Image (spheres, rainbow, N blue to C red):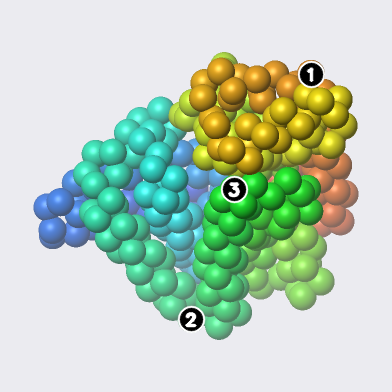
Amino acid sequence: MKDRSKIEQPVAVEFKRFNDEFAASLRSETNRLQSAIDQILNASGKHVRPLLVLLTAKACGQVTDNTINSAVLLELLHTATLIHDDVIDETKQRRGVPSLNAIFDNRISVLVGDYVLSTALIRSIQTGNLQIIGIVSNLGRDLSEGEIKQLETAEESIIDESCYMQVIRKKTAMLLSACAEIGSISAGASGEMVEKCREFGEYLGYCFQIKDDIFDYFKEANIGKPTGNDIREGKVTLPLLHALQTGRREEAEHCLHIINEKDFTTENIDLLIDFAKANGGIEYAEQRMQVYHDKAVEVLMTLPESEAREGLLLLADYIVER
């Protein structure tokens, strides 16, 4: 992560403790399950979500035992959803390494995902905080609903920006919103400050997902999945959505025909990517992302000045600049 040390600096000690507890939370005496867990730990990403939990808590007061516990449970929940998503999407790689379902099979992957999810639920109960448990429970519903909505829009070839925004709200914005909200709750923040943090996290989530969707249009993007993978799965994201609304009618109709027929050959995927780029789709998505970034920063600046708040500002910048 660019400037990772600067982002982590305010919570460096606490972040190490998170990493230790996250690894310790996943242990099994079943050989195949432990083998899968080892694969998960070796392929772990940048832990943006727990970092958001820790920085938010520090910005609102201090990191507590419940903050660490919450960071672990939220990363476990996120990990479980990724495992299940790879099964649903038949993804064979994640972050450039084979996914669990590629190494084992769908049966093992689903069960491992269930095991990780159950571990997250145990952790949520250990917080002893009904407000946190409620947020996590609602988050699980939102994540599932977002995935189903995305499958629905892909299968029915729904070309609608409002539907796209509904999907990324449920899939990503609500997760980062929960991270920031729970982080502030764990630090004993006031109701007003908790709401500000929740709002900040939601705006950050929109930025995160729009940036991920932009990556799909570039071969040099180092995100561990092939270019055009979203399109190949029938997911029409913001750059292409905009181009379909603003491009020349004849070209747009041809692209819509490809999408409706799900004729996603390599040649047609390249055509759709080029069409999105030629018609300002990338620029439009970047503009929308910047609006959410600016809103996130505006909310964040209402928190007291601190090193942790500076870390959150750097994290927001990283998300749009990565």
Q: Residues within 10 Å of mark 2 (few under 14, many from 20)?
A: few
Query: Please, what is the three-letter code of the amino acid marked with disc 3?
Result: Ala
Tag 3–tag 2 contact (CB < 8 Å): no
Task: For marks 1 and 3, give the CA distance.
Answer: 23 Å
Residue 162 located left or right of residue 112: right
Residue highlighted by disc 2: 128
**Dot 1 or dot 3, earlier in sequence:** 3
As measured in the structure, the alpha-carbon distance from the residue carrying label 3 to the one carrying label 2 is 40 Å
Distance from disc 2 to disc 1, alpha carbons, whole Å, reads 53 Å
Residue that mark 1 sits on:
278
Q: Position of residue 91 (x, y in %)?
A: 40, 39
Q: Secondary structure at mark 1?
A: helix
Can you see residue 322?
no
What percent of the width, then of the height, locates residue 322?
A: 64, 28
As helix, strand or loop, the secondary structure at mark 3 comes to: helix
Tell me if label 2 and label 1 are in contact, CB under 8 Å. Answer: no
Q: Residue at x 45, y 55 (%)?
A: 81
Work out whether mark 3 precedes mark 2 in sequence or the reverse, and give the earlier one: 2
Residue type pointed to by label 2: Gly
Up-down relation of residue 246 to residue 124 (above or below): above
* Residue beneath the point at 78% across and 30% down: 252
185 relative position to 95: left or right: right
* Residue shown at the point (41%, 36%) measured from the top left: 94
Q: Quadrant of residue 1?
A: top right
Q: Nearer the viewer, mark 2 or mark 1?
A: 1
Rendering quarter of residue 188: bottom right
Image location (x, y in percent) of residue 280: 83, 25
The x and y percentages for residue 33 are 20, 54
Q: Which residue is mark 3?
A: 154
Residue occupying image coordinates x 63% and y 63%: 178
Crowd tier of the residue under label 1, counting other residues whose Cα lies within 10 Å: few below 14, some 14–19, many 20 or above: few
Compared to 106, does 139 lie above or below? Answer: below
